[in-house]
Amino acid sequence: MNAAEHYRAMVSACQEQQARLATPYGESYWDRFAHTYRFDPNRLPEMSIREVIRRMEMEDEIIEIGGGAGRVGLPLRLRGKSLRNVEPSAAMREQFRLTVWQHQIEHAEAIASPWPMSESISADLVVTADVTYFISEIEPFLRAMHEAARRRAAILTWTVPPPNVNVKLFQLAFGETQAPSPGFRELLPVLWEMGIVPDVLVVNDEPFAWPERRPTNDDEALEFVYNELSPRDEGAVAERLRPLIGELFMRDDAYFPTWRTPSRAMLITWRTD
């Protein structure tokens, strides 16, 4: 089994388990979260995004693969020439267009398509963030990314993939070990087998975090858990986890989850010219 086959097997195992116990990963899975992916494109970018900006040139044309509402792509667009966001989710594209309209950003468009696209497309910089964990056919995905990038390709990821930070909660909620999504340890060997040796940067000052409303009571804590796991049987999960709320959350004015595996931002990038 080569690296791409191993990667495919991991994605398949994860998707099978997710579909059996919870809402399956797919385009509709992300629709209900789409509004939470709208960030101010004029904010001071996160350090990992700043590392991409450091490697840009002023007139760069940019493609983002699975760019959602533009959390990553739009700050890059403000430092470059144009942005095409190749995004299959209609809900995400709508949030992207709302952000572009709200901030009056020109030369930023959303393209309704999966990746790889059926038509040829290219840009100086091709970037993707938090997408590779869900791609079973990873080699064609990366190959198309490499071929579309006239100068640089970049993958923003984490030392622990976001689907895997809830592994302890998953075990308690469902009574079985979570099938892990592939991360950088599985991604890098695929790139190496393709003849691509990227630069890898761990951004130690950027721990995994996400803006979220903290629970203030036990009922809200269970709703928080449901949003994390999207279980098919909320009643069964509640029966297992309600007695454990005191262990799962540090309680003060708000509840803070204690189960998440610590993770740091990573940038995997290579030149294509």
Image: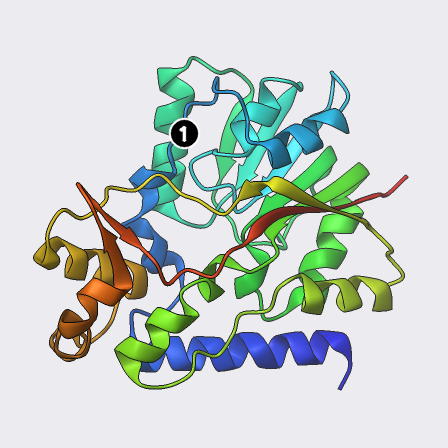
Total numbered labels placed on residues in the image: 1
Asked whether, in this view, residue 151 is left or right of residue 169, the answer is right
Residue 229 in the image: x percent, y percent? 30, 66
Could you say which is closer to the camera, residue 134 or residue 150? 134
The secondary element bearing badge 1 is classed as loop
Q: Quadrant of residue 190?
A: bottom right
Residue 94 in the image: x percent, y percent? 35, 36
Q: Quadrant of the C terminus?
A: top right
Query: Residue sitting at 48 percent across and 79 percent down?
Result: 179
Asked whether, in this view, residue 115 is left or right of residue 153, the answer is left
The kind of residue tagged 1 is Phe
In the rendered view, tell whether residue 242 sits above or below residue 13.
above
Residue 42 in the image: x percent, y percent? 48, 17
Q: Quadrant of residue 194?
A: bottom right
Few, some or many residues within 10 Å of mark 1 (<14, 14–19, 20+): some
Asked whether, in this view, residue 272 is left or right of residue 23, the answer is right
Residue 146 in the image: x percent, y percent? 78, 49
In the rendered view, tell whether residue 20 sits above or below residue 47.
below
Scheme of image coloration: rainbow
Q: Quadrant of the N terminus?
A: bottom right
In the rendered view, tell whether residue 165 sits above or below residue 171.
above
In the rendered view, tell whether residue 141 sits above or below residue 270.
below
Query: Residue sitting at 20 percent across and 45 percent down?
Result: 252
Query: Residue sitting at 59 percent across and 23 percent down?
Result: 77
Asked whether, in this view, residue 77 is left or right of residue 60, the answer is left
Q: Which residue is mark 1?
A: 39
Query: Residue sitting at 68 percent across and 80 percent down?
Result: 6
Could you say which is closer to the camera, residue 224 or residue 204? 204
Q: Quadrant of residue 48?
A: top right
